């Protein structure tokens, strides 16, 4: 079932500036977008990433007024809690959990660096194979430009938090 995504922009005083509703269906197809991540690019564009059903990662860029600029998807039946951020050089980073888009075909977490138009420049996979789920929980960039992702596995790994860094 297709559905709508809603957004609101508030000014620094908390006053409502605008609201937007995005229809993210694909015509007659069943398609549902579940946004999990939002970031603001240096030019104030809005970046969204999440999951879509029946299965995959979806990410999009909106202008500062919430108008759709572009959207992309990666068909992948096992993605969880996807994250997107704007990098200091204008590129984007996308963190996908439990992706099967890796060379060995074993689901893992992935971080992809994208150009400002959303095209994949490079991808690195990490995490643990042969677990039920690899969740992508957070993504950031430090002052030196390193991209840092955090995720967790369930249920076959024993406790702990696992950090991953990509230069």
Image (cartoon, grey):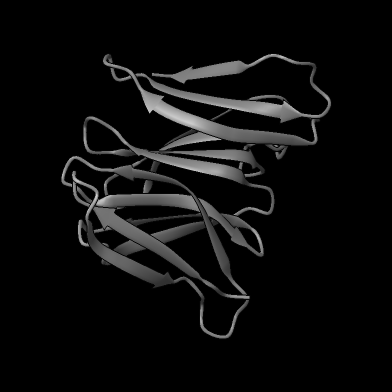
Name the quadrant containing residue 30.
Answer: bottom right
Q: In which quarter of the image is the N terminus?
A: bottom right
x%, y% of residue 20?
33, 68
Which residue: 41% across, 41% down?
84
Q: Taking 57 as reference, is 139 left or right?
A: left
Q: How many labels does the image show?
A: 0
Which residue: 19% across, 44% down?
12
x%, y% of residue 53?
63, 63
Which residue: 80% across, 36% down?
132
Q: Quadrant of the C terminus?
A: top left
Seen from the viewer's position, the closer of residues 77 and 37 is: 37
The reply to whether residue 81 is visible in this rendering is yes
x%, y% of residue 163?
55, 17
Q: From this viewpoint, which residue is outermost toward the right?
A: 156
The reply to whether residue 109 is visible in this rendering is no
Q: From this viewpoint, which residue is outermost toward the left?
A: 43
Q: Taking 73 as reference, is 13 left or right?
A: left
Q: From this viewpoint, which residue is outermost toward the bottom?
A: 28
Q: Taking 39 as reference, is 15 left or right?
A: left
Please, is residue 104 above or below residue 163 in the view? below
Which residue: 68% across, 54% down?
77
């Amino acid at each position: 079932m297709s559905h709508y995504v809603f957004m609101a922009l508030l000014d620094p005083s908390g006053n409502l500036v605008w609201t937007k509703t995005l229809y993210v269906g694909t015509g007659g197809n069943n398609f549902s977008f579940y946004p999990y991540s939002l970031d603001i690019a240096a030019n104030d564009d809005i970046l969204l990433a999440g999951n879509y059903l029946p299965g995959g990662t979806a990410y999009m860029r909106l202008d500062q007024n919430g108008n759709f600029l572009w959207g992309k998807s990666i068909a992948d039946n096992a993605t969880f809690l996807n994250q997107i951020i704007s990098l200091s050089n204008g590129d984007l980073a996308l963190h996908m959990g439990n992706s099967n888009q890796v060379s060995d075909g074993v689901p893992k977490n992935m971080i992809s660096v994208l150009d400002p138009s959303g095209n994949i420049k490079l991808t690195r996979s990490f995490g643990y194979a042969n677990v039920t789920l690899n969740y992508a929980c957070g993504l950031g960039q430090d002052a030196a430009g390193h991209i840092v992702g955090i995720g967790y596995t369930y249920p076959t790994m024993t406790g702990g938090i696992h950090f991953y860094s990509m230069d």
